[in-house]
């Protein structure tokens, strides 16, 4: 497949993830005509979701957009 301009932007955005998030390593990926497949490895053991819900005061203390989860990585990509 020969990538068009949008495909090239997607390719660059995928590679940018490893630069933007220091706790992310990227493995294989492929840009398809209408979607992307890729493997993201979170290499910091102190990241991700917890098995408990934060209290109201804990939610108020946490700045927005700083979670180190797969969801935050994908939001950054999008």
Image: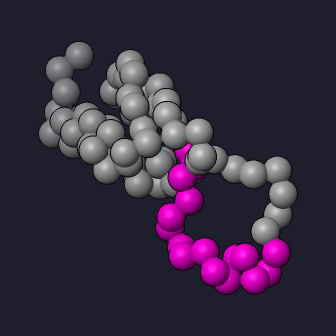
Residue 67, horizontal then vertical, whole percent: 56, 59
The colour scheme applied to this rendered structure is one colour
Residue visible at 63% across and 80% down?
A: 61
Residue 10 occupies quadrant: top left
Please state if 20 lies on the left or on the right of 52 as rendered.
Answer: left
- Is residue 35 visible to the viewer in this orientation of the structure? no
Q: Look at the image and tell me whether residue 11 can be seen.
A: yes
- Can you give x and y, in whole percent of width and height, for residue 3 in the image? 19, 27
> In this picture, is 5 found above or below 40?
below
Pick the quarter of the image with the N terminus: top left
- Residue drawn 47% across and 48% down? 73
Q: Position of residue 64 (x, y in %)?
A: 54, 73
Residue 52 relative to residue 58: left or right: right
> In the rendered view, does 7 fall on the left or right side of 71?
left
The residue depicted at 50 percent of the width and 67 percent of the height is 65
Q: Is residue 72 above or below residue 33?
A: below
Task: Estimate the x, y position of residue 74 in percent, counting from the top left.
Answer: 48, 47
Is 75 situated left or right of 1 in this image?
Answer: right
Q: Nearer the viewer, residue 52 or 38?
A: 52
Q: Which residues are magenta?
A: 55-70
Magenta residue check for 65: yes
Q: How many marks?
A: 0
Residue 51 colored magenta?
Answer: no
On screen, residue 76 above or below 27: below
Q: On screen, 4 above or below 9?
A: above
Q: Residue at x 27, y 36 (%)?
A: 15
């Amino acid at each position: 497949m020969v990538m068009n301009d949008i495909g090239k932007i997607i390719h660059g955005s995928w590679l940018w993830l490893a630069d933007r998030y220091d706790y992310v390593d990227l493995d294989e990926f492929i840009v398809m005509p209408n979607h992307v497949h890729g493997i993201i490895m979170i290499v910091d053991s102190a990241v991700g979701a917890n098995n408990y819900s934060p209290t109201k005061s804990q939610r108020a203390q946490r700045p927005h957009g700083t979670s180190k989860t797969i969801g935050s990585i994908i939001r950054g990509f999008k």
